[in-house]
Amino acid sequence: MKVFFISFSLVLLLYMVIPGPTKVSDFAHLPDSIKSDLEGDTIQIPNVSAYFSNNFRDYSTNFYRKEYKSNTWLPILPLRLNHPPEFAFTAIKKHTDSTYLEEFVYPLRDSLYVNGLEPFYENGDPRYPGATQFDAGGKSLYTKVTLRYYPSALWVKLLVWVGIMSSIYLLWHTGKRVLYEDRS
């Protein structure tokens, strides 16, 4: 059992400390897009970046899921969590309009939020009355994708690892003691 515990703790530690992206600029720009220079999309809020394009949800979210995996040396894709668009006010920044919000996360590590604003459907029909296209770089574009990356500091990961290992150790010994005391 000791060998299993030590092996598990080392594998978990390795998983948690393998290097990954440290800032949103470590992620590639969305293909065929124009980087937003609007206030709040550049340097005002740390680890936020936005792009105007004609890439809709499926393309954008799959692109950033694969991009996140390629920036992390892990052999698995990150978990994909779908959040209500209203959560963008909290996860991305205040006053963020949204039609979808997805989070890509490696548990006990970091998170990448991909927020999309799509005033039009892919066939060009407006989603709501008064929908307008985005004018950027002399082009009219259909979508805006905003990223927010939440990295974890190494010391936080180590502290969490110590907490998990301590909890497992204490639960194991408490369970063993309770089990053997019941037999007496």
Image: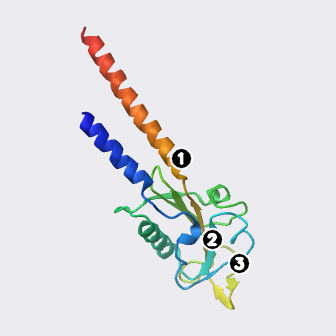
Tell me whether circle 2 and circle 3 mark residues in contact (CB < 8 Å).
Answer: no
Residue projecting furthest to the bottom: 138
* Label 2 or label 3, whichever comes before in sequence order: 3
Instruction: Indicate the secondary structure of the residue bearing disc 3.
Output: loop
> Which label sits in the foreground, 2 or 1?
1
Percent position of residue 37, x then y: 71, 78
Q: In the shown orientation, is residue 11 left or right of residue 84? A: left
Residue highlighted by disc 3: 37
Instruction: Indicate the secondary structure of the residue bearing disc 2.
Output: strand
* Depth check, front residue: 126 or 5: 5
The quadrant of the image that shows the C terminus is top left
Residue highlighted by disc 1: 156
Type of residue at label 2?
Answer: Ser
Place residue 138 in its image quadrant: bottom right
Instruction: Indicate the secondary structure of the residue bearing disc 1.
Output: helix
* Label 2 or label 1, whichever comes before in sequence order: 2
* Depth check, front residue: 42 or 53: 42
* Residue at the image position 54 percent from the left and 53 percent from the top: 152
Percent position of residue 8, x then y: 31, 43
* Depth check, front residue: 162 or 47: 162
Type of residue at label 1?
Answer: Val
Residue highlighted by disc 2: 49
Percent position of residue 69, x then y: 42, 66
In the rendered image, the vertical position of residue 18 relative to residue 71, given as above or below = above
* Residue at the image position 64 percent from the left and 61 percent from the top: 92
